Amino acid sequence: MTAEDLEALRAEVAELETAGRAAIAAEIKTAREWGDLKENAEYHAAKDAQGHLEARINKLLERIRTATVVEAVTGDVAGFGSTLEVEDDSGRQLVYRIVSSRDAEPAKGLLSSDSPMAAALAGCRPGDVAVVSTPKGERKLRVVTVR
Protein backbone atom coordinates (compact mmCIF):
# COMPACT_ATOMS: atom_id res chain seq x y z
CA MET A 1 0.00 0.00 0.00
CA THR A 2 1.04 3.58 -0.39
CA ALA A 3 2.06 5.75 2.55
CA GLU A 4 -1.18 7.68 1.99
CA ASP A 5 -3.22 4.47 2.30
CA LEU A 6 -1.39 3.52 5.50
CA GLU A 7 -2.07 6.93 7.00
CA ALA A 8 -5.77 6.58 6.11
CA LEU A 9 -5.87 3.23 7.95
CA ARG A 10 -4.25 4.79 11.01
CA ALA A 11 -6.78 7.63 10.96
CA GLU A 12 -9.67 5.16 10.71
CA VAL A 13 -8.33 3.17 13.67
CA ALA A 14 -7.98 6.36 15.71
CA GLU A 15 -11.56 7.34 14.91
CA LEU A 16 -12.91 3.90 15.80
CA GLU A 17 -10.90 3.69 19.01
CA THR A 18 -12.14 7.06 20.21
CA ALA A 19 -15.50 8.19 18.83
CA GLY A 20 -16.60 4.70 17.79
CA ARG A 21 -15.97 3.15 21.19
CA ALA A 22 -17.54 6.13 22.98
CA ALA A 23 -20.71 5.85 20.89
CA ILE A 24 -21.03 2.12 21.58
CA ALA A 25 -20.41 2.65 25.30
CA ALA A 26 -23.20 5.24 25.37
CA GLU A 27 -25.57 2.82 23.60
CA ILE A 28 -24.76 0.06 26.09
CA LYS A 29 -25.23 2.40 29.04
CA THR A 30 -28.62 3.55 27.75
CA ALA A 31 -29.75 -0.01 27.05
CA ARG A 32 -28.69 -1.17 30.55
CA GLU A 33 -30.94 1.46 32.06
CA TRP A 34 -33.96 -0.16 30.39
CA GLY A 35 -33.94 -3.09 32.79
CA ASP A 36 -33.57 -6.86 32.63
CA LEU A 37 -30.56 -7.67 30.47
CA LYS A 38 -31.77 -11.19 29.61
CA GLU A 39 -34.66 -9.88 27.55
CA ASN A 40 -33.22 -6.52 26.54
CA ALA A 41 -32.86 -6.61 22.73
CA GLU A 42 -31.31 -3.14 22.61
CA TYR A 43 -28.58 -4.21 25.04
CA HIS A 44 -27.78 -7.35 23.02
CA ALA A 45 -27.73 -5.34 19.77
CA ALA A 46 -25.34 -2.81 21.33
CA LYS A 47 -23.06 -5.60 22.58
CA ASP A 48 -23.08 -7.16 19.09
CA ALA A 49 -22.18 -3.78 17.60
CA GLN A 50 -19.36 -3.51 20.13
CA GLY A 51 -18.05 -6.92 19.02
CA HIS A 52 -18.16 -5.87 15.36
CA LEU A 53 -16.37 -2.62 16.17
CA GLU A 54 -13.59 -4.41 18.05
CA ALA A 55 -13.23 -6.96 15.24
CA ARG A 56 -12.91 -4.12 12.70
CA ILE A 57 -10.28 -2.38 14.85
CA ASN A 58 -8.30 -5.62 15.18
CA LYS A 59 -8.50 -6.28 11.44
CA LEU A 60 -7.23 -2.78 10.65
CA LEU A 61 -4.43 -3.04 13.23
CA GLU A 62 -3.33 -6.32 11.65
CA ARG A 63 -3.28 -4.69 8.22
CA ILE A 64 -1.16 -1.85 9.64
CA ARG A 65 1.26 -4.32 11.27
CA THR A 66 1.71 -6.32 8.07
CA ALA A 67 1.67 -3.41 5.63
CA THR A 68 4.38 -3.03 3.07
CA VAL A 69 4.63 0.58 2.01
CA VAL A 70 5.58 1.17 -1.60
CA GLU A 71 5.92 4.39 -3.48
CA ALA A 72 3.08 5.22 -5.80
CA VAL A 73 4.04 5.70 -9.40
CA THR A 74 4.32 9.40 -10.17
CA GLY A 75 4.08 11.33 -13.38
CA ASP A 76 1.87 10.51 -16.31
CA VAL A 77 2.58 6.77 -16.43
CA ALA A 78 -0.05 4.47 -14.89
CA GLY A 79 1.06 2.14 -12.12
CA PHE A 80 0.47 1.26 -8.48
CA GLY A 81 -1.27 4.13 -6.71
CA SER A 82 -2.27 5.89 -9.94
CA THR A 83 -5.76 7.20 -10.55
CA LEU A 84 -6.76 6.92 -14.17
CA GLU A 85 -9.64 8.35 -16.10
CA VAL A 86 -10.41 6.13 -19.07
CA GLU A 87 -12.98 6.02 -21.83
CA ASP A 88 -14.42 2.68 -22.90
CA ASP A 89 -15.61 1.56 -26.35
CA SER A 90 -19.02 3.17 -25.83
CA GLY A 91 -17.51 6.56 -24.89
CA ARG A 92 -18.35 6.19 -21.20
CA GLN A 93 -15.86 7.88 -18.84
CA LEU A 94 -14.64 5.70 -15.94
CA VAL A 95 -12.23 6.41 -13.09
CA TYR A 96 -10.01 3.68 -11.62
CA ARG A 97 -7.30 3.62 -8.98
CA ILE A 98 -4.69 0.86 -8.90
CA VAL A 99 -4.39 -0.43 -5.32
CA SER A 100 -3.21 -3.50 -3.42
CA SER A 101 -5.26 -6.68 -3.69
CA ARG A 102 -6.40 -6.20 -0.07
CA ASP A 103 -7.87 -2.77 -0.87
CA ALA A 104 -9.47 -3.71 -4.18
CA GLU A 105 -13.17 -2.94 -4.65
CA PRO A 106 -13.87 -3.02 -8.39
CA ALA A 107 -17.41 -1.66 -7.95
CA LYS A 108 -15.86 1.47 -6.41
CA GLY A 109 -13.19 1.76 -9.11
CA LEU A 110 -10.39 0.34 -6.92
CA LEU A 111 -8.53 -2.18 -9.08
CA SER A 112 -6.20 -4.79 -7.63
CA SER A 113 -2.69 -4.30 -8.96
CA ASP A 114 -2.81 -8.06 -9.68
CA SER A 115 -5.95 -7.84 -11.84
CA PRO A 116 -5.90 -8.22 -15.63
CA MET A 117 -7.36 -4.72 -16.05
CA ALA A 118 -4.65 -3.11 -13.89
CA ALA A 119 -2.01 -5.12 -15.73
CA ALA A 120 -3.34 -3.85 -19.06
CA LEU A 121 -3.40 -0.24 -17.82
CA ALA A 122 0.04 -0.33 -16.15
CA GLY A 123 2.58 1.66 -18.10
CA CYS A 124 -0.05 3.52 -20.12
CA ARG A 125 0.07 7.27 -20.65
CA PRO A 126 -2.75 9.64 -21.62
CA GLY A 127 -3.85 8.82 -25.16
CA ASP A 128 -2.78 5.17 -24.97
CA VAL A 129 -5.31 2.41 -25.55
CA ALA A 130 -5.22 -0.61 -23.24
CA VAL A 131 -6.75 -3.87 -24.38
CA VAL A 132 -8.22 -6.00 -21.60
CA SER A 133 -9.31 -9.60 -22.12
CA THR A 134 -12.65 -10.27 -20.43
CA PRO A 135 -15.01 -13.26 -20.48
CA LYS A 136 -17.15 -11.31 -22.97
CA GLY A 137 -14.19 -10.60 -25.25
CA GLU A 138 -11.64 -7.85 -25.60
CA ARG A 139 -12.39 -4.46 -24.09
CA LYS A 140 -10.53 -1.34 -25.21
CA LEU A 141 -9.91 1.50 -22.75
CA ARG A 142 -8.43 4.80 -23.89
CA VAL A 143 -6.49 6.52 -21.11
CA VAL A 144 -7.64 10.13 -20.74
CA THR A 145 -5.65 11.20 -17.65
CA VAL A 146 -3.21 9.67 -15.15
CA ARG A 147 -2.79 11.19 -11.67
Image (cartoon, grey):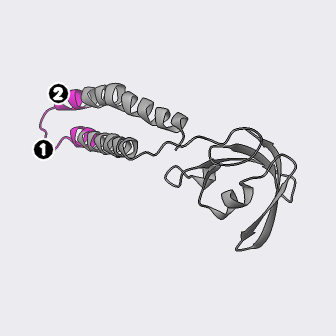
Q: Tell me which residue sits at (30%, 30%) in the image.
A: 21
Task: Tell me residue 29's x, y (percent).
Answer: 20, 27
Q: Which residue is mark 1?
A: 38
Q: Position of residue 56 (x, y in %)?
A: 35, 43
Helix, strand or loop at label 1? It is: loop
Asked if the stretch drawn in magenta spans residue 33, the answer is yes
Read off the magenta span.
28-46
Along the line of sight, which residue is nearer the eye, 55 or 118?
118
Q: Residues within 10 Å of mark 1 (few under 14, many from 20)?
A: few
In the rendered structure, the answer to whether residue 108 lies left or right of residue 94 reads left
Tell me: residue 107, above or below residue 2.
below
Measure the alpha-carbon separation of dots 1 and 2. Answer: 13 Å
Q: Which residue is mark 2?
A: 33
Whole-percent x and y of residue 140?
A: 82, 62
Callout 2 secondary element: loop
Q: Total number of numbered labels?
A: 2
Residue under the point 43% across and 45% down: 67
Q: Amino acid at mark 2?
A: Glu
* Residue 59's disc number: none
User: Amino acid type of disc 1?
Assistant: Lys
Q: In the rendered image, which quarter contains the C terminus?
A: top right
Q: Is residue 85 left or right of residue 79?
A: right
Q: Position of residue 118 (x, y in %)?
A: 67, 57
